[in-house]
Amino acid sequence: MTVEEIRGDGDNFPVGLRVLAVDDDPICLKLLETLLRKCQYHVTTTSQARMALKMLRENKDRFDLVISDVHMPDMDGFKLLEYVGLEMDLPVIMLSANGDPKLVMKGVTHGACDYLVKPVRIEELRNIWQHVLRRKKCDNKNPKKSSGQVKSHQANGEGLGSPTGNADQNGKFNRKRKEDEDESEDNENDEDPSTQKKPRVVWSIELHRKFVGAVNQLGIEKAVPKRILDLMNVDGLTRENVASHLQKYRLYLKRISSAASQQAHMAAAFGVKDSPFMHHMGSLDGLGDFRTLSSARLPNVVLSPYTTTTNAMLGRLNSPSANVSLRNLSPSVGPLQPSQAQNLSSSIASLNKMNFGTQNTSLFQGIPSHLEQNATNNNSKGILGTSNFNAIDELLNGASFNPEPFDASGAFGSSNPLLSSTESFHSQLPLVNGSRRNDASLNGAYLNTDFSSGVGLVGGEVHNMNYGNNIFGSLNSSNISGNGIVSRLGRSLGQNNAISNQRMDGFVNGRSSVSGGSNLLQQNEIEKPVNELRQRSNEDSFLLEETRLNAGFVPQSYDSLDELVNAMIKREQDETVSNCEFQFDDDYAFGNGI
Amino acid sequence: MLGLSVERLRADMNRLLALLFHQGVLDEQFLQLQQLQDESSPNFVSEVVNIYFHESEKLLRNLRALLVDKEFSDYKKMGTHLNQFMGSSSSIGAQRIRNVCVAFRAASDQNNRPGCIRALELLEYEYCYLKNKLHELFQIEQQRILAATVRYPMQQQHHQQQQQQQQPNNP
């Protein structure tokens, strides 16, 4: 079902959605089937995950959406999720009797667009079409046509009686509104070939095997999309396709490798233990994660040189040459591991001297273990933030991130971790933006407005978070769909989707709104300066990554980190992309899926 | 009269359902099941519930087999069975059973074998109670359907008898 087909039906949009339901429990399967039929979807059921994979592989166009149980005897639901994501790129909804936040988080990090808890209610199933639509919009990138229809579907979506809260509705609305704005902006740049609609590449097993072979041949460290593409020697495959697939693949590898390196303290906040993203984000403890998350977020939001800090690095970063120095962060990540405090300063120093490296992978990989050691080191948090950034932003801003230590690496309950980290955000912000952006003034202005609101938001959020894991839990759950969006975002990077800072801000704000509920306004305010930013820097990827980080929110950024790195690599190699405005995946907006 | 019995049967059924809801044996999910029953799937509820009985008995047997073993240590495997049982119970609206499953899971998480055994016994008890009540419910339902289908000819007969009786009284 194409987006056009879906939209064309107007009121009947969700009718005929083709769903594949997988559950080993015959009662739930039968119930699910009946409920889905009641929603007028086309349902195919199977109790075997392997059978489901077989059906999916036989004909990738046969289904629009997969709903799968988590606990199945022949294959773990998460594994099925990954296969589907890697090979068919269909939206997958997880289903389980167990609503434990840890499992939900796991679903989110593995790329599920939603996580339903049994017993499933029909109201929840009535909404699943949005995941399909979102993904298709992300893929098709058909701005003119979709902008009008987005509005109509917006009405549809909200009229479908979604039981989600007002915040979500608002989020949806804002997201769609931003999408429209984005799309209209995007229209102006349609000449850029990379923004044009591309036919979707289907990663068959053979193709994937070739891909893996090429990657192994090159070595995971050196595997860059261009060389992989050359090695694969497949017609019709573009570097963007390979890049986005590489992102997913890296994500997958990280998951496998980091499964062993779980951190107990992370469980407190998110229950996320093995997410590389979490590691990247200053994972040390829940709060630390959050902080790094926020720190990652803030810079993303701002994306403009923030010149409030006196950090020398910042000044350096603001200059174009700073990018080069930043890029080299990855090598420094290694040394960071043993003693982060020292490494922090040395890495920061070395950042300036570093050359652009293409060691994102190593950086990436280095980060999780190195992050583990960060538990006790506040400074390292700063590094983590920076290193995260580097990894994420191709070592861009990471290094410059914040030499000033975050106060509290703090566990979730620490008093003002966010506040202290917001300081660092300030310093980080310029770094992030500085390397890429030359318009300090405007960005600065933007940053100021945005930052304050963002900080406020983040601060508010953090405090909220501090005060209760519940919020986290709710945020996590509400982020599930966001996560899906983020990963989709990553996928769309290859296609240079437009991103909007607004969206990012909105995302951040929206996230805040999940806890606070009143940040949508701020988000609107931020949008204006964001528009200005749009035309600015060339490195939309940069912005993209940052946005991603922000939007990634806590668990979701996990996906975005990988995507970011890959995107960065890709952008590195793809100079022509720079003309585009920042493109932020339409669907990236926060909270719409919940 | 059969005509009356249809109404009486329906009343019995409603009373039984109300009791089960009141006791917390069933919850609103069961109502959702009933709402899904329509012309296209006229026996939906009884079909689903029968599958549930079948599966549950298997699961309960497995759980018991695991727990009676004195050297029992495979809590993970037990957790899998339990998870499935919990999922299916909550899907049909068996609220009390699901609650016992939650307690069971807690005991299992703590590797508390005696606690698990107690929970299993409670589970078996609740399950038996639910099964009996649902069987009763289905029996009443079946009788009601039967009574309703034969109602028309009987009612006609009844009506004719009434008319005949009334005729002599007419002036």
Image: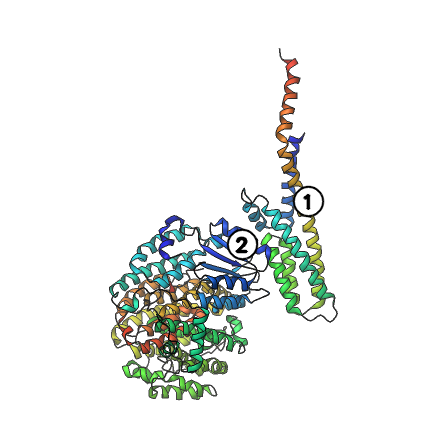
Say which residue label 1 marks: B136
Q: Which mark is residue A328?
A: none
Which of these two is toward me, A573 or A104?
A: A573
Residue A563: x, y in percent?
A: 40, 73
Q: Is mark 1 on a helix, strand or loop?
A: helix
Task: Give the CA distance from mark 2 to mark 1.
Answer: 26 Å
Q: In this view, does A466 lie to the left or right of B118?
A: left
Residue A301: x, y in percent?
A: 35, 70
On what subunit does the disc labeled 2 rest? A
Amino acid on which the number 1 mark rests in the picture: Glu
Check the picture and name the quadrant holding the C terminus of chain B.
top right
Amino acid on which the number 2 mark rests in the picture: Leu
On what subunit does the disc labeled 1 rest? B
Identify the residue at image location x=55%, y=76%: A264
Q: Is residue A474 positioned above or below B7 on the image?
A: below
The 10 Å Cα crowd at callout 1, few under 14, some 14 to 19, many 20 or more, is some
Say which residue label 2 marks: A32
Q: What element carries label 2?
A: helix
Residue B58: x, y in percent?
A: 68, 58
